[in-house]
Image: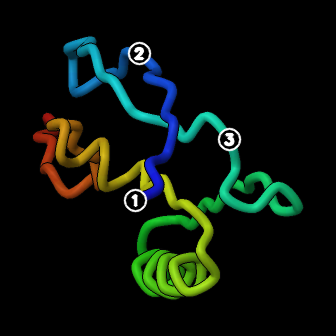
Amino acid sequence: MHSVVQTMIDYTYLDGDVVKPGMIAIPASASMPEFPSFFLFAFVKSGSVLVNSLVRDLLTDCGVLLIDLPTHLLRGGCHRDDGASAHATAN
């Protein structure tokens, strides 16, 4: 069985008004040296779920390791502010 060598990265992030610590495992080397890495960013409400799903399936089929940052942060308790909360204003 082949194991992937990983580097642990400590970080902090802002969750609401609180700074929280986090940690993520990053592969120490690329699974495909000719294709070391890339970053995919898709805006919320612009098809990001579809884009992430398609890219996840494609990378998995091609044997490229995937680091899903949004899922990692969500599991760690970091919640996105989608602007849905109502703010009262004085008239």
Q: Tell me what residue is drawn at x 21 percent, y 43 percent.
A: 79
Name above or below for residue 61 compared with residue 39: below
Is there any visible trace of residue 46 in the rendered image? no
| Marks 1/2: CA–CA distance | 28 Å
Measured as percent of width and height from the top left, residue 24 is found at 38, 32
Position of 73 relative to 42 (above/below): above
Location of mark 2 (residue): 10
From the viewer's perspective, is residue 25 above or below residue 82? Answer: above
According to the image, label 3 marks what residue? 29
| Cα gap from disc 3 to disc 1, whole angstroms | 17 Å
Q: Are marks 1 and 2 in contact (CB under 8 Å)?
A: no
> Label 1 amino acid?
Met
Q: Nearer the viewer, mark 3 or mark 2?
A: 3
**Marks 3, 1: nearer the viewer:** 1
Q: Nearer the viewer, residue 40 or 62?
A: 62
Q: Position of residue 71 (x, y in %)?
A: 30, 55
Q: Is residue 32 left or right of residue 28?
A: right
Where is residue 58 shown, x and y percent of the image?
58, 85
Dot 3 surroundings within 10 Å: few (below 14), some, or many (20 or more)?
A: some
Tag of residue 1: 1
For residue 14, which quarter of the picture? top left
Precedes in sequence: disc 3 or disc 1: 1
Q: What amino acid type is highlighted by mark number 2?
A: Asp
Camera-side residue: 77 or 32?
Answer: 32
State the quadrant of the C terminus.
top left
Can residue 8 be seen here?
A: yes
